[in-house]
Image: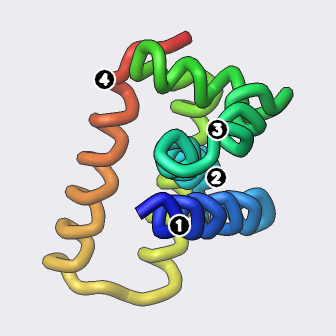
């Protein structure tokens, strides 16, 4: 199982890296999953992520307190607003699709904004 967790962790790091360049793909959730996988497979890689100068504080805050920084919450809000706008303008959806996407995004934002901040 260690190998499975190691491969999954490396995959999540890869997806997080891609998310640095694509605004619709989030980085932090993939890194949270990666550090969880590394905790079961590679202490060295887990430590590397937790001590990373850019991502480490956010990952430690999540691990210790389930906290999301205010800046990340605002980025999630902005990203979803842009994504929803592009969805409306680019696909000409019907009312049911609009409601479904709005509900899904609102649920995600509700979760993010109900987490503690740090």
Q: Quadrant of residue 70 in the image?
A: top right
**Total numbered labels:** 4
First along the sequence among labels 4 and 2: 2
The colour scheme of the drawn protein is rainbow
Question: Of tags 4 and 1, which is closer to the observer?
Answer: 1
Spatial separation of the CA atoms under disc 1 and disc 3:
13 Å
Left/right placement of residue 88 relative to residue 32 reads left
Q: Which mark is residue 3?
A: 1
The reply to whether the C-beta atoms of the residues labelled 4 and 2 are less than 8 Å apart is no
First along the sequence among labels 3 and 2: 2
Image point 75% across, 61% down: which residue? Answer: 17
Secondary element under disc 4, as helix, strand or loop, is helix
The reply to whether the C-beta atoms of the residues labelled 1 and 3 are less than 8 Å apart is no
Image point 59% across, 55% down: which residue? Answer: 26
Indicate the position of residue 54 as horizontal and vertical percent values: 81, 32
First along the sequence among labels 4 and 3: 3
Indicate the position of residue 10 as horizontal and vertical percent values: 65, 63
- Reading the image, the residue beneath label 2 is 27
- Reading the image, the residue beneath label 4 is 114
């Amino acid at each position: 199982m260690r190998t499975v967790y190691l491969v999954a962790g490396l995959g999540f790091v890869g997806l997080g890296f891609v998310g640095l360049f694509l605004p619709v793909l989030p980085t932090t959730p993939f890194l949270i999953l990666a550090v969880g996988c590394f905790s079961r497979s590679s202490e060295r890689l887990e430590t590397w992520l937790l001590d990373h100068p850019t991502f480490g504080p956010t990952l430690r805050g999540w691990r210790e307190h389930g906290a999301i920084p205010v800046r990340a919450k605002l980025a999630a809000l902005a990203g979803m607003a842009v994504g929803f706008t592009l969805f409306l303008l680019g696909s000409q959806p019907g009312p049911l699709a609009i409601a479904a996407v709005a509900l899904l995004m609102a649920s995600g934002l509700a979760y993010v904004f109900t987490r503690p901040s740090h």
